[in-house]
Amino acid sequence: MLLYVLGILVVAVGVVLSIGLHEVGHLVPAKLFGVRVTQYMIGFGRTVLSRRRGETEYGLKLVPLGGYISMVGMFPPAKGGGRGRTASTGFFNTLVQDARDSSQEQIQPGEEHRAFYRLAVWKRVVIMLGGPTMNLLLGILFTGIVLTGFGVYQPTTTVASISKCIVPATQATTVCRSTDQAAPAANSGLQPGDRITAIDGRAVSSWTDVTDVIRTSAGTAITLTVAGTGGERRITVTPASNTVAVTDANGAPVRNAAGTLETRTVGFIGISPTEQLTRQPATAVLPAVWNNTVSVGAVIIHLPQRLVGVAQAAFGSAPRDPNGPISVVGVGRVAGEIASSPEVPVVSKVASLVGILGSLNIALFVFNLIPLLPLDGGHVIGALWEGLRRSIAKLFRRRDPGPVDTAKLMPLTFAVAILLGGMSLLLIYADIVRPVTLF
């Protein structure tokens, strides 16, 4: 239990630090560009601890599941300098006007030039991208620590186990039956611990080298040169034809339009490799981060469909997708399982926890780029749209259209906030009643 709690605490502290550094990514360029920042807060709700330094209040709030910096003049005043419609015109119009009023009231006399909306477009983009960029850098850092410092488990050319039979992909069970064909390696003389050094006289240095030859040699005898406890010896074996499932780039089984599992026939002798923790070169870090980013993007694109699956698992009997979205609660539970598992070596536990923080920061990076307010991507799109309008007006020698009134998007922002809140509650509930488990 102590290790379980320790795993949760490690990830919890990492999450808070990641949030804090995300906001630093906004804070530093905002101050460099002269914007008056009134608050830097980690969390939401009641303020637990705060201290004022200069013109900015730095603090920690009760629920540390987010953060924000408050910049004066986030929204421009209504055109014509008026206050716009009053609260009597409706709830959403009240949202718009309240956002404008709050933004303008923070501007002190003589400091109108320090309002956020008065900055050049590129400066606003830099400020709003500062947070996601910080998460990306953290993701690269944590991924680099895992890959180059700890390494990843990779298959070697040493045999770990030998199958007794051939089990087709269409068979529901992996248990050998009396009618199943014996695996070619079972009676060949191969033993667990044997290291394959060559096939048909050609040296092999990786498990991929071994499987590439075996898969393309169905029905053709091949000679394996192996090194074991009895010294080097040669073993001749004929790969049998076996039906295996076709998988996509993520390793998931591929099904056709009728829902049937797609298969193909390959050579098979019935051996599996040992795995060894292998450090990766620095050049492997960015490709790994990119693959992680693409995976997170795919999850976000299919998020509505995946949330339906989460709801069916949480409120029904459907199984929970282990590759589906999880909340911070789910991340904590996974971290606790890893830290408390007696089967996992200490080095692997540390690497896994660091890897979780890396993946979490990549997720924050991608999620915050969604072009919807109140996310950072929404502010970026608003600034770019303003720049485009002004460029077109200048090109055609028209009057400057002025700043884009993003306050008008407050109803949409309100709706997005409700959706995000509902999504978070659903995921948290699902992670409590039907959690994703590793073991």
Image (cartoon, rainbow, N blue to C red):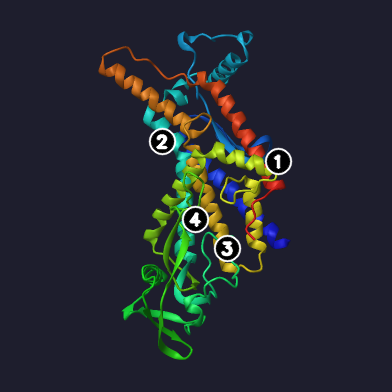
Circle 3 residues within 10 Å: few <14, some 14–19, many ≥20: some
Of pointers 3 and 1, the one earlier in the residue sequence:
1
Q: Earlier in the sequence, mark 3 or mark 4?
A: 4
User: What residue is disc 3 on?
Assistant: 350
Q: Residue furthest right?
A: 1
Of labels 3 and 2, earlier in sequence is 2
Q: Is residue 171 above or below residue 105?
A: below
Rendering quarter of residue 268: bottom left
Give the residue at x 57% y 41%: 306
Nearest to viewer (mark 3 / mark 2): 3
Q: Position of residue 248 (x, y in %)?
A: 44, 52
Residue sitting at 57 percent across and 63 percent down?
Answer: 350
Label 3 and label 2: CA atoms lie apart by 34 Å
Residue sitting at the far front:
179
User: Position of 4 compared to 186: left or right?
Assistant: right
Specify few, some or many for label 4: CA neighbours under 10 Å numbering under 14, 14-19, or 20 or more: many
Residue 133 position, x and y percent, is 44, 43
Residue 315 circle label: 1
**Res. 142 mark:** 4
Q: Earlier in the sequence, mark 4 or mark 2?
A: 2
- Examine the rendered structure and indicate whether residue 294 appears above or below residue 153: above
**Quarter of the rendering occupied by the C terminus:** bottom right
For label 2, the residue is 126
Residue most toward the bottom? Answer: 230
Give the percent coordinates (x, y) of residue 242. Answer: 46, 66
Q: CA distance from mark 4 to mark 2?
A: 24 Å
